[in-house]
């Protein structure tokens, strides 16, 4: 089955460009990234903190089947409702350094929208290590879940 979330990783570049079209109005897609209760549902994680504003920060936490805690956090540098979010992303207690995420939200029609994410890593090597993980499957699962959860809000 073809994955709906597309990941473009050009050789020699330290970035990923991720795109996904959703059968959701722009406002609902954006809400899925900024409202804690919705984020928790589609990401399957606990939202410890989510300040959806310029200079805000966020902290997410998940627990694996063995009971190990995994944390994720960052700072929001730019925040333009229904347009874009620029933020850092850090996986706590890993060898990965924080990276930048540029999220752009675009209305395609009254009922459809598009998310474009540009993730910029410190090095090509770090980006390539991320791609060795089940990254593509994970982001597709998450975006499929987002579509499913937010459909109920229509």
Image (cartoon, rainbow, N blue to C red):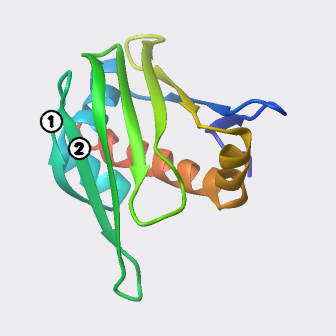
Q: How many marks?
A: 2
Provide residue 26's location: percent of width, then percent of height.
35, 19
Residue 83 rendering spot, x and y as whole percentages: 35, 13
**Is 110 on the left or on the right of 119, as rendered?**
left
At x 54% / y 61%, what residue is drawn?
95
Contact between marks 1 and 2 (CB within 8 A): the answer is yes
Of residues 22 and 80, the one nearer the viewer is: 80
> In this image, 126 relative to 99: left or right?
right
Does residue 143 sit above or below 18 in this rendering?
below
Residue at coordinates 18% horizontally, 31% vertically from top-left? 56
Residue assigned mark 2: 58
The answer to whether residue 137 is visible is: yes
Q: Is residue 122 above or below residue 2?
A: above
Mark-to-mark CA distance, 1 and 2: 6 Å
Query: Which of the image's four quarters has the C terminus?
Result: top left
Residue 4 versus residue 79 in the image, above or below: below
> Which residue is rendered at x = 38% and y = 24% of the image?
86
Q: Quadrant of residue 105?
A: top left
SS for tag 1? Answer: loop
Q: Nearer the viewer, residue 84 or 150?
A: 84
Left-right relation of 48 to 98: left
**Outermost right residue:** 11
Q: Report helix, strand or loop for mark 2.
A: strand
Name the disc covering residue 51, or none.
1
**Residue 154 visible in image:** no
The numbered dot on residue 6 is none
Counting from the top left corner in percent of width and height, residue 120 is at 57, 31
**What crowding class fits label 2: few (fewer than 14 Cα within 10 Å), some (14-19), or many (20 or more)?**
many
Residue 55 x/y as whole percent? 20, 25
Residue 106, by quadrant, is top left
Front residue of this view, candidates 42 and 11: 11
């Amino acid at each position: 089955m073809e994955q709906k979330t597309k990941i473009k990783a050009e050789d020699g570049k330290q970035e990923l460009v991720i795109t996904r079209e959703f059968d959701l109005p722009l406002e609902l897609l954006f809400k899925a990234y900024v409202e804690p209760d919705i984020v928790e549902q589609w990401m399957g994680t606990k939202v410890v903190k989510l300040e959806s504003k310029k200079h805000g920060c966020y902290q997410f936490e998940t627990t694996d089947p063995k009971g190990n805690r995994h944390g994720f956090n960052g700072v929001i540098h730019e925040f333009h409702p229904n347009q874009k979010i620029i933020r850092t992303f850090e996986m706590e207690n890993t060898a990965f350094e924080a990276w930048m995420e540029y999220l752009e939200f675009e209305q395609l029609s009254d009922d459809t929208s598009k998310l474009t994410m540009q993730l910029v890593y410190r090095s090509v090597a770090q980006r390539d290590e991320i791609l060795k993980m089940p990254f593509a499957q994970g982001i597709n699962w998450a975006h499929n879940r987002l579509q499913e959860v937010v459909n109920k809000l229509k």
